[in-house]
Image (spheres, rainbow, N blue to C red):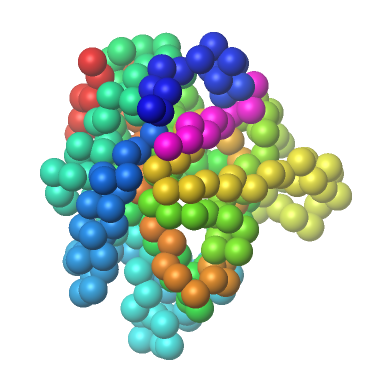
Amino acid sequence: MVAKQLSEIEAEQFARDGFLIRRGLIEPDLVSQLIERIDASLNPALAPVEFEADVHYPGAPASRWSEGGQTPRRLQHAFGRDALFRQCASLPAIVGTLSVLMDTNDLMLSQNHHNCVMTKHPGYSSLTSWHQDIRYWRFDRPELVSTWIALGTENVENGSLLVIPGSHKLTIDPGRFDAALFLRTDLQENEALLATAVPVELEAGDVLFFHSRTLHAAGQNSSSTVKRSIVFTYHAQDNEPIPQTRSAVFEGIPVGH
């Protein structure tokens, strides 16, 4: 039996590191159903879809019309796509964990940020540089938490996430980021910080909870199989998006108790 209740040690770990892995939180039967539903949406790719070519990240195809240009990166608007995704986003084990980590029972799921199925395909997946998700999000407080639900093995070989523990508590000078707000790897003053990075290795059913200010990156998929993950972002009900920003385009969904 998977332990559903969050321990005090786990809560302290999240507060210290800015991320927490909870193993086996998603039951195997639900994992299998989610994989089946995702694969049916990948071939053909059912809109709305973000393609690897759209992001122009290192390793991505040059355009949608070049070789590999139709490689999906994100199946967007996951919550609205299917009842199975809505079930996954509202699981008591996930909502209960978030309630403790965010110290509130009044939780909202953002339809504007993440809310997607992330895929990494062999051969054409791109590299994501070091960044904080909050860089383009606009809320009263930069206190949001995302869940990364693994539907298979995730490791460095197939492009797993890398995180920098404790980076959610840092104040980093703007000059240490580039114009797109990625942490610059050409600066000596960033080298010590980057040296503390750790890979997030997951198995099917594991869930990563990570703070919106936690620095993270991801590599390319050099394996022979597609990697699939589901990502949702949550905020407290009283932490409202700033009007007339991207964060306020679609209304939040209550998922609290």
What residue lies at 49% left-to-right and 70% top-to-bottom?
125
Task: Relative to 133, say whether 241 is above or below.
Answer: above
Task: Relative to 137, say whether 127 is above or below.
Answer: below
**On the rendered structure, is 29 left or right of 201?**
left
Depth check: 157 or 216 in front?
Answer: 157
Pick the quarter of the image with the N terminus. top left
Residue 71, given in percent of the width and then of the height, sits at: 37, 74
What residue lies at 59% left-to-right and 45% top-to-bottom?
200
Pick the quarter of the image with the C terminus. top left
Task: Relative to 114, say whether 165 is above or below.
Answer: above
Q: How many marks?
A: 0
Q: Magenta part of the protein: which range?
A: 15-24
Depth check: 31 or 108 in front?
Answer: 31
What residue lies at 43% left-to-right and 88% top-to-bottom?
67
Depth check: 159 or 185 in front?
Answer: 159
Asked whether residue 250 appears in the rendered view, the answer is no
Residue 251, given in percent of the width and then of the height, sits at: 20, 34
What residue lies at 74% left-to-right and 55% top-to-bottom?
185
Q: Is residue 159 magenta?
A: no
Q: Is residue 22 magenta?
A: yes
Q: Residue furthest right?
A: 188
Task: Relative to 93, say whether 53 is above or below.
Answer: below
**Where, by quadrant of the figure, is residue 170 drawn?**
top right
Asked whether residue 176 appears in the rendered view, the answer is yes
Residue 246, given in percent of the width and then of the height, sits at: 32, 43
